[in-house]
Amino acid sequence: MEAQKELKRDEIAEELKWDLALMYKSIDQWEEDFKRIQGYLDRLMLFKGTLKQGPARLKEFFELDDEFSRLIEKLYTFAHLRSDEDTSHSQNRGYYERILSMHHQCSAALSWARPEILEMDENQLQEYLKSPELSFYRFALEKMLRYKPYTLSEKEEKLLAMAAEVTSVPYKAFSMLNNADIKFPKISGEKGEEIQLSHGVYSQLLENHNRKLRKDAFEGMYSTFEAMKNTLTTTIDGAVKANIFNARARGYSSALEASLFKDNVTPKVYNSLIDSIHENLPIFHCYISLRKKALKLDQVDMYDMYVPMIPEYDLKVPWEQARTWVMEAFQPLGDEYCKVVKNAFTERWIDVKETKGKRSGAYSSGCFDSKPYMLLNYTETLNSVFTLAHEMGHSMHSYLSNSNQKYHYADYSIFVAEVASTTNELLLLDYLLKTQDDPQFRTYLLNHFCDGYKGTVYRQVQFAEFEKHIHEKAEKGEPLTLDSLNQDYYELNRKYYGPELENANDLIKLEWARIPHFYYNFYVYKYATGFTAAIVLSRNILSGDQKKTSHYLDFLKAGSSQYPLDILRHAGVDMEDPASVSGGLKYFDTQISELEKVLGI
Ligand SMILES: [Zn+2]
């Protein structure tokens, strides 16, 4: 693997590199397009103060603005993909920074448009909504107008915009501590060598089969956060208060409501997710007991939650094999879908190999006027086959939305973003479970699923519930102190993990202090809803019912043409119905039993 890391880009076969020439043949072409920005901006600025003149005028503005955004996105996508090929290439980094800063400038220059629309009086807005000229933009306009009751006067809006620089400080302070100033201890490795802890090393160590290493890593990590506990109480208190300040200033009834408003999700979805998980905690407790038995431990602790329940399993999956598996696993989605997946390989949408300086990890990224490219760092592990299936899910979602929607509604929302990717992972899981007999392989697959479900559903809902607690507490005027945060977190942890972890290492009470997501303003519940929806939808697809599959494909084609919950409902999963969450939980339950069986315990 180390040798692979040193490979240079020009040593990699063309067919394993993405083909960005499909966007721009040369950087000169990109420069030509870049020069067009100013002309668009000048033309758009001529609309300032005129949007009230009538629906036709507004339509003209929207259309020009769409054209302009498409151009900016294309320039941006190309520059960021090219820069990620080798992050140390300063010239390519330069193109990326140029378009990024140009984008910020343009957004600032055009920031008058939205308030100008929202300022119109009710009668005029109703006339606009009914006008045939604006029929295509009606939904976009409606979405914008939902904000009218929460939009303040120009002077107040200006104040809030100024305050944003201040209210973002708690998160910035946390990030600085967590990424820059933090000093982790060294722990001693299996052969007595020193291991310098870091965020990355910590997660690797928690997956190690040596329990002492896991325990030392855990204690090393938490003692580091314990040393900063008072400062971190202050940063989280500040972040919560900032959310409450913003929500109250605009007249929302709570910080939770304000945060969910964007996706048109009601607190009911959030609360019923938590309720369903509460009702089904015994399933999670069974999983913990299985973990204890599989790891042959008398007692489990929080540092035993990430190590795979199976002995090390080193299966090499060559790229060709991964391609075949993925193509076959997606068969239930139909020929049309599979044909495009094939194109993704032959038209070179994917950058497969790890090379010197290439950005790490994996993603799917593109725009309306490009292929939905995928960046991978494929390492021939089973995990990286699942990553391929995952990113292909995102890319196919983008491809189908881009080809079936006009630009304005092509981009899907974050709320549904992880549904298509997780669905594809679940299809791959099902395919491999059906076709592979090797018990070790099957154990690996079931463990992979169960651990994924634990981390994406139970853990994230626990976080979501903690977030809700601390916001409600602060909204009632109760102070968030170190002791109250610790106690609240510890109790919640105990509730979720159940009897086997009744007396878990006390340091876990500080977990809130190290989780960046608590600064993301009610974000994590989306991981759980996305995974849940994917389970229900993948079961629908695998049932063989063509109608259900075609509803799922409609979802992939819908972009943001409706609200996310409506799109999902049409696809076949109602996130307001607790039955959806329990459907996912039932599936988790059966997979635990399967795992129990193959493990022979
Ligand atoms: Zn993803």
Image: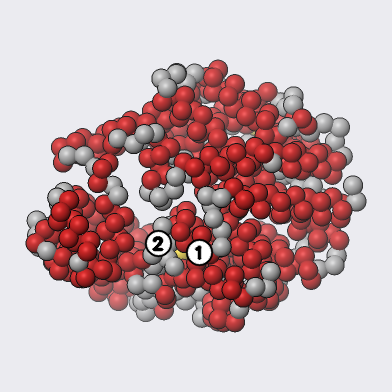
Residue at (46, 71) in percent of width and height: 557
Tell me, for residue 562, which label it has, or none. 2
The quadrant where residue 50 appears? bottom left
Instruction: State how far apart marks 1 and 2 are (Cα).
Output: 10 Å
Residue at (78, 31) in percent of width and height: 500
In the drawing, does residue 343 fall left or right of residue 586? left
- Mark nearer the N terminus (1 vs 2): 2
Q: Is residue 89 visible?
A: no
Q: Could you classify mark 2 by the number of other residues whose Cα lies within 10 Å: few (under 14), some (14-19), or many (20 or more)? A: some
Q: Nearer the viewer, residue 496 or 131?
A: 131
Evaluate if marks 1 and 2 touch, with contact meaning CB atoms under 8 Å apart.
Answer: yes
Residue at the far right: name it. 600
Image coords of residue 34 (percent x, y)? 25, 68
Residue at (50, 67) in percent of width and height: 555
Residue at (70, 38) in percent of width and height: 281
Q: Could you classify mark 1 by the number of other residues whose Cα lies within 10 Å: few (under 14), some (14-19), or many (20 or more)? A: some
Tell me, for residue 570, which label it has, or none. 1
The quadrant where residue 194 appears? top right
Q: Amino acid at mark 1?
A: His
Q: Amino acid at mark 2?
A: Gln
Image coords of residue 372 (percent x, y)? 46, 70
In the drawing, does residue 323 fall left or right of residue 469? right
Image coords of residue 240 (percent x, y)? 42, 30
Q: Is mark 1 within 8 Å of ligand 1?
A: no
Q: Nearer the viewer, residue 119 or 191?
A: 119
Mark 2 element type: loop
Question: Number of marks in the image?
Answer: 2
